[in-house]
Image (spheres, rainbow, N blue to C red):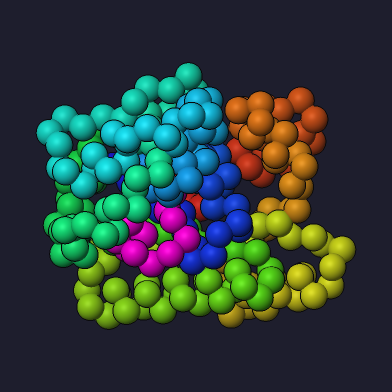
Amino acid sequence: MAKVIAVTNQKGGVGKTTVSAHISFALQEAGHSVLHVDLDGQGHSSIYISGDKAINSRKGGAERIFDRLEGLRGDATPCGVDLLHGHLDLGKLDEGEKTSADALALRDYVKSLPYDYIVIDTPPALQLRQFAAMIWADVLLVVVEPEEKALRGFMKVKEVVELLKSKGLLAADYKWRILFNKVDGRIAEQQKVVDGFMESYKGIVIPVPLAERKALINKAYSARVPVWKFKDTPKDLGGIWRGLPSLLGVL
């Protein structure tokens, strides 16, 4: 059975796309078979993983997982991660005939797909696609920036997780984690937020926040390589990104 990791927040721009892609990169490099499912209509993690900047304009991607296709596999990519890509028409899933009950009924099917790991990048809104990823997941990773709007997005996700748990809709061994991203250690208020969360959510907050390195991350994205393979990346920073699966507790 595949282990399913969903990466989410109800605010865009927090870095969930970059984080989800790097979890897939790292798991594949560690020798595991990985399916990356990009449910975000912008398809940015699909572009990163495939190297195809036009992939988000083509149908026939992540929506296939909702059709319970027998023998479903993602498309092979140069980096070794199989991909069900995101594209601009995915929003139709939220407006169509599929319901939350349909998504719940797919959980065993998703876990039965022939991979060691399935990593899901979600859209930044609680509609069918995000809901489905949350209830399919064994591990839900909420990526957060230490700023007000991102923290409000986290609180909305937390409310949904607690509601789903109360209704018995999550797996018995379900885990969720919080990862702070784009943290500037020179800003005392940001560090105060991180420290406060670590105290309030002991065992849930990943103890190694990701530093604000926008320029470097963007360059690695443009080169279509994991950040640890980009020539300008400091070794210690690359090691943190490469170690995301271990920090998440899935390796």
Residue 62: where, in percent of width, then height? 32, 41
Q: Is residue 52 visible?
A: yes
Pick whichever, 97 or 200, lies toward us: 97
Examine the image and state in which quarter residue 75 appears: top left
Pick whichever, 148 or 200, lies toward us: 148
Q: Residue at x 27, y 43 (%)?
A: 63
Q: Is residue 145 above or below residue 115?
A: below
The verdict on residue 136 being magenta is no
Please give the count of numbered marks on the rendered protein.
0
**In what quadrant of the picture does the N terminus appear?**
top left
Residue 159: where, in percent of width, then height? 41, 79
Residue 190 lies left or right of residue 128; in this view the side is right
Q: Residue at x 53, y 25 (%)?
A: 51
Pick whichever, 149 or 237, lies toward us: 149
Pick whichever, 14 or 58, lies toward us: 58
Q: Is residue 117 visible?
A: no
Residue 149: where, in percent of width, then height? 62, 73
**In the current view of this chain or complex, which residue is farthest to the right?**
186
Residue 33: where, in percent of width, then height? 36, 30
Q: Residue at x 60, y 56 (%)?
A: 13
Q: Is residue 167 above or below residue 242?
A: below
The verdict on residue 123 being magenta is yes
Segment tinted magenta in the rendering: 118-131
Q: Residue at x 29, y 52 (%)?
A: 92
